[in-house]
Amino acid sequence: MRLSELDYDLPEELIAQEPLARRDEARLLVLDRKSKSLEHSRFYKLVRHLREGDLLVLNDTRVLPARLFAQKESGGRVELLMVRPVGPLEGPAGAWIALIRTHRVLKDNARLILSDGHALRIAGYARPGRPIVVGEGGVSIEQILERGGTLALPHYIHRSVGPADVNDYQTVYAARPGAIAAPTAGLHFTAEVFKA
């Protein structure tokens, strides 16, 4: 198989920009491996297609408000997506590795000012494009995210984050904080489908 065989055209107008009112109303394409037939269904009917012995693997990670917007001291805009806390051998305690979007590479010790006045500092790089970021003034990255972080919507959603998105882009079985993007494969479960 060639990678090019997996290419397909998906017109922009077919990409939903808002979730369905009922998440389990999403379309479900079911492949019967024995007969090689396809059935168009809905997600709330998933339980009809599961059999005893089937294994359902769930990502129970809760999505963090991991996206931050800041300004360089020179005034340039910076977007950060906080990926994870650094390990003990990677950088200073309390630091996080981030993805960064800016016009120019930031130097070590560059300060980034958040809209609430708190500051972040670049404490080095884990690798190119992956800065190690620390909070200044005794404020942790976790506190900064809790106060001013926003959800990172999937890249194909072209709108601002709204209040409802905090729940809409979280699975009903999310438990452990740690994801920086919605685990989209599980978003169609409702409590009723999950229970069934």
Image (cartoon, rainbow, N blue to C red):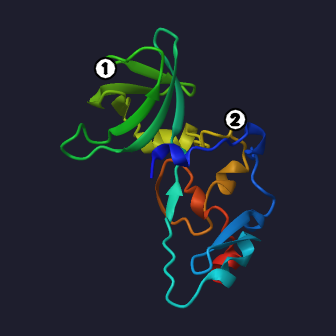
Q: Which residue is pictured at 78% across the width and 57% down the height?
A: 20
Q: Residue 93 occupies which quadrant of the picture?
A: top left
Q: Residues within 10 Å of mark 1 (few under 14, many from 20)?
A: few
Residue 18 coordinates in the image, percent (x, y): 76, 48
In space, the residues marked 2 and 1 are separated at their CA atoms by 33 Å
Q: Amino acid at mark 2?
A: His
Residue 70 coordinates in the image, percent (x, y): 52, 24
Mark 2 / mark 1, whichever is N-terminal: 1
Residue 171 coordinates in the image, percent (x, y): 60, 63
> On the picture, is 122 further left or further right than 101?
left
Residue 118: give its label.
none
Residue 170 coordinates in the image, percent (x, y): 61, 58
Q: Which residue is mark 1?
A: 109
User: Camera-side residue: 9 or 71?
Assistant: 9
Q: Residue 48 occupies which quadrant of the picture?
A: bottom right
In this view, 113 is above or below 6: above
Q: Which residue is mark 2?
A: 158
Q: Which residue is pictured at 55% across the width and 65% down the height?
A: 174
Q: Residues within 10 Å of mark 2 (few under 14, many from 20)?
A: few
User: Camera-side residue: 115 or 178?
Assistant: 178
Element class at badge 2: loop
Q: Amino acid at mark 1?
A: Asn
